[in-house]
Image (cartoon, rainbow, N blue to C red):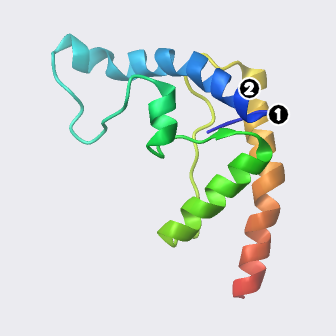
Amino acid sequence: MVAADSDREAMALGRRAWPDFYGSFMKLWKKHDTQPRFARLPEDFDTMVQNGGAIAGSRGTIREQVRRMTEEAGANYFISQVSFGNLSQQEVLHSAGTFAREMLPVARERVAQTV
């Protein structure tokens, strides 16, 4: 997950960071001319987002995507990785902070409705 002030900025961050992550993740499999058995990752970030394996966007986009995903799955929790590739500490903290400010109130409200 990459959260930024705009969808465009978040996608740019993800596109920049993804090649480093992908290269590190795939290094040993490529060295041995094989693929991970249960993790099929695309080489580009846009495909990762399009396939639902990543979320990138502004706070409203993140909020809507997480809401949609958890409702469709019937999930009562959400796990996200906000640090990957070459994202800086500041970029990671911005994503995590945005997620916390936007999603924790929504999660508390959903819990209150079910109790």
**Dot 1 corresponds to which residue?**
5
Instruction: Determine the residue positioned at 52% across, 38% down.
Output: 49
Please state which of residues 89 and 5 is positioned toward the viewer in this rendering: 5
Q: Evaluate if marks 1 and 2 touch, with contact meaning CB atoms under 8 Å apart.
A: yes
Task: State the SS at label 1.
Answer: loop
Neighbourhood count class around disc 2 (C-alpha, 10 Å): few under 14, some 14–19, many 20 upward:
some
Q: Is residue 112 above or below residue 96?
A: below
Residue 99 lies, with reference to residue 18, above or below; the image says below
- Report x, y in % for residue 85: 55, 20
Residue farthest to the left, as pictured: 33
- Name the side, left or right, on which 50 lies relative to 30: right
Q: Nearer the viewer, residue 101 or 58?
A: 58
Q: Is residue 47 left or right of residue 107?
A: left
Q: Which residue is mark 2?
A: 9
Question: Which part of the image, by quadrant, shows the C terminus?
Answer: bottom right
The quadrant in which residue 87 appears is top right
Residue 71 position by quadrant: bottom right
Q: Quadrant of the N terminus?
A: top right
Determine crowd level at label 1: few under 14, some 14-19, many 20+ residues with C-alpha closer than 10 A: some
Q: Which mark is residue 46?
A: none
Percent of width and height locating residue 25: 38, 23
Q: Quadrant of residue 56?
A: top right
Q: CA distance from mark 1 to mark 2?
A: 7 Å
- Residue at position x 78%, y 23% in the image: 90
- Asked if residue 92 shows in the view, the reply is yes
